Image: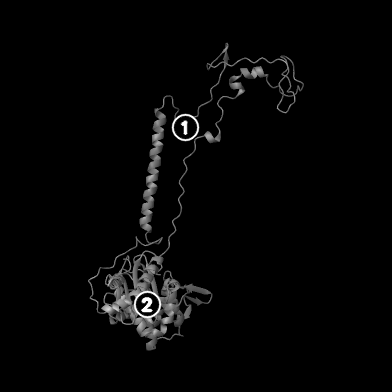
Amino acid sequence: MRAGRFLAAIAMMLLLAVPPASAGPTLLFDAADGRVIYAEDIDDQWHPASLTKMMTAYVTFDAIKAGKVKLAQSISCSDNAFQQPPSKLGLAVGGSITVDQALQILIVKSANDVAVMLAEAVAGSQEAFVAEMNATAKRLGMTRTHFSNPNGLPAPDQVTTARDLAKLARAISRDYPGYAAYWAMPAVRLGKLYMRTHNGLLKSFEGADGMKTGFICDSGFNVVGSATRDGRKMVAVVLGERSSPERTLRAASLLEHGFQNSGWKELFGAQTIDTMPVAEGRQAISVRDDVTSWDCGRQKRLAAREARAKARAEARAKAKEQAKQAAAAKPGAAQPGAVTEPATSVKVGGSSAAGNAKPKVKVTGTAPAAPNGDTAPAVPPAGTKPANSGAAAAPPAAVVNKLPNNGAVSGAVLPESMKPQAPQRPTVRPVTTFAEDGQ
């Protein structure tokens, strides 16, 4: 009896266990029938970023099927394609690749220029291709999706939802299984160029076999990732994570959850991405200031940096003023920047003018030994010329002791270390930023 209750408790824990909450919408479903394993905010609108290229590929597959273009057909780089920002292949205007190569580079490298090249080859212009993208989204039941360009670069009205992306992913797997290898490629080579995928699941998760990542500052880090184990294919949609490693970890957690718990969902039944009631959902928001990227939160970080620099400057000025006031408050304190000459002492009638008398020195007998052991020359008697009459005679020691400050020159120059120093300017390092790339 106890064993039965224990097993029932374990089963309930497995049933109720769900992955931790994420930053944005998430969805996990079975690719075979669309059965939902886990869902969170799946009808909130979100910027798709380069997940847009999933639709670009799907529309191109449709065009190949219809005979509009062929895999071996060459397509060229227009000026419009050349002007697209990174991530990009970087062909010169007039450069060409085949449709087959373009699809591989579109999915693996996520090249924005190649997306435009495919759009112009399939529909004649980027605008006409975007119209086909929106018509296809409507046909697939993607009711809260709108496309403005074929590559996912920032556009305020380019939005989708986790549910709509799930419908697109399922349609790709169902309608075009022959292109499955494109989504699973870890890298692609074009001549000397070797381009690796941005999909971390393909490197780290057992059974991972696709699909696509996306990133712009407003969307955060997105991924639609799929994996197959024992003939069962699971697909996870993760939107708005703060970093690339976090989106990979979140997707892996969802997929593992699906493989471990999908049996319980079958036992108790579950809704599909088509039958689950549609929530009103929120409008698209920007997570620019939350993501881990040098460029995305640049304005916020620069403002904080300027505030810190201003606070440091004010603190230095305050400390300097306090030190100046403290110096002025001392009796007889010298004014800042003034140089004080060393005091002199002049012998006047047995006492010093400065009040500290110097003793008279009487020189008798042999001169003291020099530091090297030799005998120093004796001071010649008064009135006697030195042996070297051509050289200027040094003054006797007794005379030296009567000179002011032992013969030192009044007003001696201060050493460099004691001179007032100019305040040092703080070092300003350049800020390195990285452009949004649509990854």
| Quadrant where the N terminus is found in the figure | bottom left
Residue for badge 2: 54
Residue 154 location, x and y as percent? 35, 68
Q: Are marks 1 and 2 in contact (CB under 8 Å)?
A: no
Count of number-bearing discs: 2
Residue 309 location, x and y as percent? 39, 48
Q: Identify which amino acid the numbered label 1 is placed on.
A: Gly
Say what secondary structure mark 2 lies in.
helix
Q: Who's the residue at 35% across and 78% down the image?
A: 169
Residue for badge 1: 337
Residue 289 location, x and y as percent? 34, 60
Please indicate, yes or no, whether residue 184 appears anywhere in the rendered image. yes
The image quarter containing residue 411 is top right
Residue situated in front as seen by the camera: 124 or 372? 372
Q: Is residue 182 above or below residue 2?
A: below
Q: Is residue 269 left or right of residue 391?
A: left
Rate crowding at label 1 as few (under 14), some (14 to 19) or many (20 or more) other CA atoms within 10 Å.
few
